[in-house]
Amino acid sequence: MNILSWFNDQVLRMTWLNDLVGAGIAAAGLDPASRLGGSVQFFIYDVIKIFLLLSVLIFGISWVQSYFPPERTRRILGGRTGLGASVLAALLGTITPFCSCSSIPIFIGFTAAGLPRAVTFSFLISSPLVDLASLILLASVFNWPVALAYVAVGLVIAVVAGTLIGRAGMEDQVADFVRTVPVHDNEQSMTRSARGAFAKGEVAAILRRVWPYVLIGVGIGAAIHNWVPEAVVTGLLGQDKWWSVPLATVIGIPMYPDIFGTLPIAEALLAKGVGLGTVLSFMMAVTALSLPSLILLKRVVKMRLLTMFVGVLTAGIVVMGLVFNALTPWFV
């Protein structure tokens, strides 16, 4: 336990970095205990911590992912049906560090290849919602029980929502062009150096994509943490408010950061007394139901299927949030 505690504090949470940033701010003439100094410390510490963890995690995950290109993933899932296929699709989604928008081209390829609707939607939901990087980063902000529970519930939501959509009989609700997309199977084995180059490229590509959202998210988190009174936050999203989970879910939909950009906001909200389930509902809505991804998905599926996708996923997120709020004492 001592080793695990040290790992959480010094490697994941990087408390040494927070102390170092605080000392630097004090040396520059700012009081870390003041609102301005605390905001600057929160911003610098969280930005450095998130980018350091992201770089290491994405490199390792991308190295693993190099063994599972879309062609191989499609072949693994091909010919499988039923609940087991949906579970496998959701698990494979966890090793693909895609945002909700970048998952859609793979969804198109899976659909064109004739994979069952339940399988394709389980993968589409799981890929942005839960991945190995989010597991580690959640543990760095909250703790391991919360991180593991978030991933487990995310997988359950992906499997259940995908299964319900698959059983709804909406085979005609996919855009016609999707069925005619050519399917290529050009998987090639990679050398170790090629895998390293691929992993470095993924780190650069994902950092280029997420850095604005990380900065915005950390900025919002710093403002909430140091400038917004706790009474205001709890009055709107307090754990005792019945509407907090549905409201947090709705607030998250118009946004489009990855989970990495929402973590600082979630950390600040939790510190202000917002319920754990409310915070996690907000994070899930941002990552799985962002408005830009829904607009893109509308080009791929017809309105009836899109409506069911949004409805089932929203219901799953809200139920998850209510359960987590009820069980908060078990996790924090």
Image: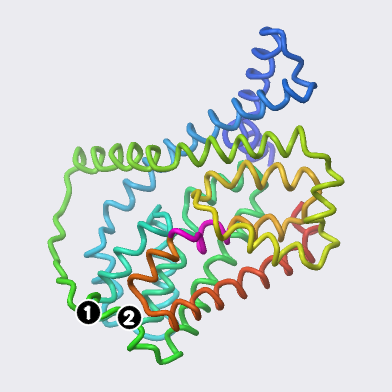
User: Residue 32 at what x, y percent from top left?
Assistant: 75, 19
Residues tagged 1 and 2 counted as in contact (Cβ below 8 A)? yes
Q: Which span is picked out in magenta?
A: 284-292
Q: Is residue 285 left or right of residue 192?
A: right
Secondary structure under tag 1 reads helix
Considering only vertical position in the picture, is 218 above or below 176?
above
Q: Quadrant of residue 110?
A: bottom left
Q: Magenta region, mostly helix, strand or loop? A: helix
Mark-to-mark CA distance, 1 and 2: 8 Å
Q: Is 285 one of the magenta-colored residues? A: yes
Q: Quadrant of the N terminus?
A: top right
User: Residue 166 at what x, y percent from top left?
Assistant: 42, 85
Considering only vertical position in the picture, is 197 above or below 64?
above
**Residue in the image at 69% along x and 27% along y:** 39
**Residue in the image at 73% along x and 56% along y:** 276
- Residue type, mark 1 in image: Arg
Question: What residue is pinned by disc 1?
Answer: 179
User: Residue 173 at what x, y percent from top left?
Assistant: 36, 84
Q: Which mark is residue 60?
A: none
Question: What residue is pinned by disc 2?
Answer: 174
Q: Is 17 one of the magenta-colored residues? A: no
Secondary structure under tag 2 reads loop
Nearer to us in this view, 296 or 197: 296
Q: Quadrant of residue 302?
A: bottom left
